[in-house]
Amino acid sequence: LDLDHDDDEKTKGNGLQEGDGAYSWEKEYDRSWENLDEDEVGRLKITELDRRVQKRRKLLKTKDTRMVRRGLTRYVFLVIDFSESMSERDLKPTRLAVTIRVVEAFIREYFDQNPISQLGIVITRNAKAEKLIDLSGNPTKQIAALKRTSGATSVAGEPSLQNALDVAKTSLTHVPKHGSREIIVLFSGLSTCDPGDLFGTISDLKSKFIRCSVIGLSAELHVCRHLVNETSGTYTIALNEEHYRELLFQHTLPPPSVSKIEAEATAPKELIHMGFPQRKFDEYSSLCACHNTLTQSGYLCPRCSGKYCELPTDCSICGLTLVSSPHLARSYHHLFPVPLFVEANNVSEGVKPRNRNKCFGCQVEMEEGGIRFQCPRCSQLYCIDCDTYIHESLHNCPGCEMSIYRAKTDSLDTTMTPKQRQSEVDRTGPISK
């Protein structure tokens, strides 16, 4: 008599267990009560604004806004643990499902912040490592490949940290020297099944200036700590899904180039060849070099006239890096970050903004006594929405840019007409900050 089998059938019949074997209380749920709070008279109110303010305050203490040397071109391999430990349900519904969601969002944010960089994915399971997708600059292909592999039966066996690092190291060894080489490991297991000396692999990574960072979903491991210490990386443990996302999104900012600069201080400097193709539309279709399909529009390589559907990419014919000027500009803002704004209540009395009740960005009146943020350079005030938009998307302070423009126009001849003054500013360019 199979009592366990009978109990399982009864449980499924009562609707307590779903098709994937998870009980109803193990499913992901929405903590809607955390969004509620009471006011002075006991009525419920939404506290979304308070949480956003607390998040900005935490960012003010932790974010690194120093002007240090960083690499504009990054070559990053994301190593994902697909062992049986990823089926644990401490993250709802499973560690694997949460990891897939977080990685998809990370891929989009990574290419938004680093448009001329490349990313590859390696998975490890059954004591082996598999390159899911090689280094490329196409986030759509990477997300599609990740979804194809993230089925319920995709987790198996034990992870192999050494095999995964060797697979990523083989590809990173051949990338150009001007780019930063990084490996980000998302590790869930409490052990690693390796075929050889893992510490020798770590020493090899250190000699090749490959920075390794680890985000753990379980307890801290000595071998992972040794890996990040030797390669100047970081090691963190995720507490929940939101914390997991924050830890992974910290890697969208290029790390400082420290070890590589010291090693190559005496090496000769070389210019990087890049092409800036324009989009062309033809009357007749022709083959593109990226997909080998007939298209009427595309970007033509300025060196060999090879046709490509999207940018950035590397020309498969002549090897020239093809980018657009907006891509290069978006990568450049990491070198000169916007300073974090401070709350206006904490600003010294000597700083007097022109208007304490109006946001300089959106020009909307702010509530009296409400939360407002102030730029430490230009002393202009911003609401929390503009503060978030400036630091996460725009990467330029409107008040600082206005001050630069005014300083430029004030230095011109006062006898010029407004049109002549504007033409002179456009010709000479902005003043350096």
Image: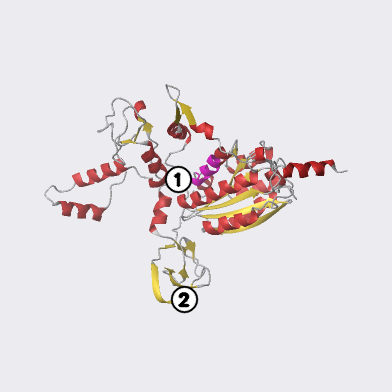
Look at the image and tell me whether residue 174 can be seen.
no
Magenta span: chief secondary structure: helix
Q: Which residue is mark 2?
A: 286
191 sits left or right of 327 in the view: right
> How far is mark 2 from mark 1, CA to CA?
42 Å
Residue in front for this viewpoint, 155 or 119: 155
Tell me: residue 385, above or below residue 116: above
Q: Residues within 10 Å of mark 2 (few under 14, many from 20)?
A: some
Label 2: state its secondary structure. strand
Q: Residue at x 68, y 51 (%)?
A: 152
User: Which callout, 2 or 1, points at the residue further toward the start of the chain?
Assistant: 1
Type of colouring? secondary structure
Does the magenta-highlighted stretch encompass residue 394? no
Q: Amino acid at mark 1?
A: Arg
Quick check: marks 2 and 1 in contact, CB under 8 Å? no
Tell me: residue 403, above or below residue 278: above
Q: Which residue is mark 1?
A: 69
Q: Which dot marks residue 285?
A: none
Residue 432: % across, % down: 31, 46
Q: Amino acid at mark 2?
A: Ser
Residue 168: % across, % down: 62, 54
Tell me: residue 113, above or below residue 41: below
Callout in the foreground (2, 1): 2
Does the magenta-highlighted stretch encompass residue 249? yes
39 sits left or right of 121 in the view: left
Q: Residues within 10 Å of mark 1 (few under 14, many from 20)?
A: some
Residue 50: % across, % down: 44, 31
Q: Residue at x 34, y 42 (%)?
A: 397
Report the span colored magenta. 245-255
Look at the image and tell me whether residue 123 can be seen.
yes
Quarter of the picture containing the N terminus is: top right
Tell me: residue 372, above or below residue 284: above
